[in-house]
Image: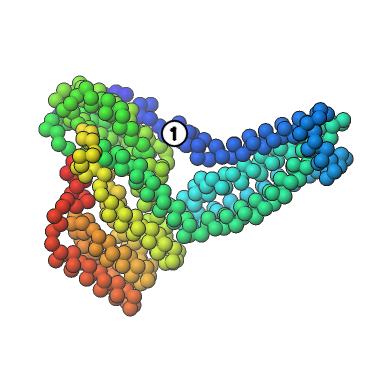
Amino acid sequence: MSDDQHPDGVREVIVAPGDIRRGRPRRWRRTATEFAAVPLLVILGFCALAAVSIIADQTNSVGVLNTARVAAGHVVGKQAASTALQAIATGLVTVASITFSVLLLAVQQTASSLSPVVLDQFIRRRSNQAFLGFFVGLALFAYVVMAAVQDSTPPILGATLGTLLTVVAGLVLLLLVYSTVAQMRPANVVRVIHDRILVARREEERTVASTRRRSTSGHPVAALCRAKVTGYLTHIDLDPMQRALSTAEDAEICLHVTLGQHVSYGDTLATVRDRDINRAEAIARQVVAALTVSAQRDLAHDPTTGIDQLGNIAWTSGSSAKHNPEIAREALNALEDIAARWLADKPASMPSQDLPEPLAIVYREGDLDRLLDVFYSMLIAAHESQQHTFAAAVLHAYSRLLQRAPGPVGRRLRRDLSHVTDILDEIPSSPQLRRARRAVDTAVQLGQTAPAPTGPSHSEAKGAQ
């Protein structure tokens, strides 16, 4: 990291690639917990079962294992044990490789028509991970037991267990095929994104509740951070910034980037307001340590990633690229539900005696604005494809949101609708579209004549901190 004196007296901290935390360690840790953990546990279970069967087949002592081996000998003969294990190992690998290849092609086809997030959903699902671990583990079980075969002790118990588990594998294979087909339905794809957006929003609300929406410091900007890295901001750790501010009571950090935002070379990441320029520079260095930039966006912490994914599905399906308004309406319904929840929820940053005093950190989140941008773009897509049914669905969503939106949000919705009047006139008219436009006009008139709210609105409460 290097620092230079800005021409107007501001200390400029240049963030080099080695200074900011990269997303690779976090990505590897997430891969281990979200994908590799379940298959590895299942495979380890099969390895333990293989060890038990080998011990039972190679011991002649009287006990439970020996009794099980003797009982299994009535089902699997000594001469057929090794042959059965060999057939199970080779056949299972062949069937599993073909099945998974075909399923991945189906997943890829769905991803190309909906969104690349479909592939991510397929990989992240716990049931799919368990199925993959089952097939790999059973194949390893057969190979390990077959490798430990001795002439004097045929693998009777191992072959019996392998045969029974192969029957189970056949049932699992049918379940996997059905499960994959069900997961590829557009409604299920949209539902998973919808649920993950809500989880990510709750994660981000912790950051929102602990920070301010606007600056309250009377000091000028004394230091700023500029980036020499590129990628997406995927994580903000408030603890290092809180520790840095503990040494400067009147200092303030203003973050110029939000979760999910792309960072380019030379972008300003944050500014520090303080009367001591040297202390401000030290705080700026701690801010750098609190940010994580990754090559890919992370829906686990950033709800705008899911909003963009649903918006992409709605745009491609509702425009002339796909001409599939049914899928577009699925995405629209999910987005409307998210908007209704966010408008109904009490802002996490609303002043309350139960909440601690916000940190001297300014974080200007804009999730709701991003969501409203997607609604506006869907009207443009409906105009581009001349789909009156999709346009009517979007207008009905606008009319319902107008009934719930507080002052500033309602004004934003009415302003957006006033800008699309001309393009709505160019869409082929239909009874459905005319009813939707009348519903919007009624909602707009009610919003304009409604009395001003007595309490703080959603946006005003967020700006009060």
User: Where, quadrant-wise, is the C terminus in this rendering?
Assistant: top left
Residue on which the image places disc 1: 26
Instruction: Tell me what residue is drawn at x 81 percent, y 28 percent.
Output: 61
Query: For residue 230, which quarter of the picture?
Result: top left
Instruction: Tell me what residue is drawn at x 30 percent, y 27 percent.
Output: 240
Instruction: Tell me what residue is drawn at x 61 percent, y 39 percent.
Output: 42
Crowdedness near tag 1: few (<14), some (14–19) or many (≥20) residues, C-alpha within 10 Å: some
User: Where, quadrant-wise, is the N terminus in this rendering?
Assistant: top left
Residue 16 visible in the current orientation: no
* Residue 423 in the image, given as x and y percentages of width and height: 28, 68
Q: Residue furthest front?
A: 63
Label 1, secondary structure: give it. helix
* Residue 20 in the image, given as x and y percentages of width and height: 35, 29
Query: For residue 274, which quarter of the picture?
Result: top left
Q: Residue furthest left?
A: 218
As drawn, is 372 to the left or to the right of 87? left
* Amino acid on which the number 1 mark rests in the picture: Arg
Coloured how?
rainbow
Residue 196 visible in the current orientation: yes
* Residue 248 in the image, given as x and y percentages of width and height: 19, 24
- Of residues 49 and 193, the one drawn nearer to the viewer in this rendering: 49
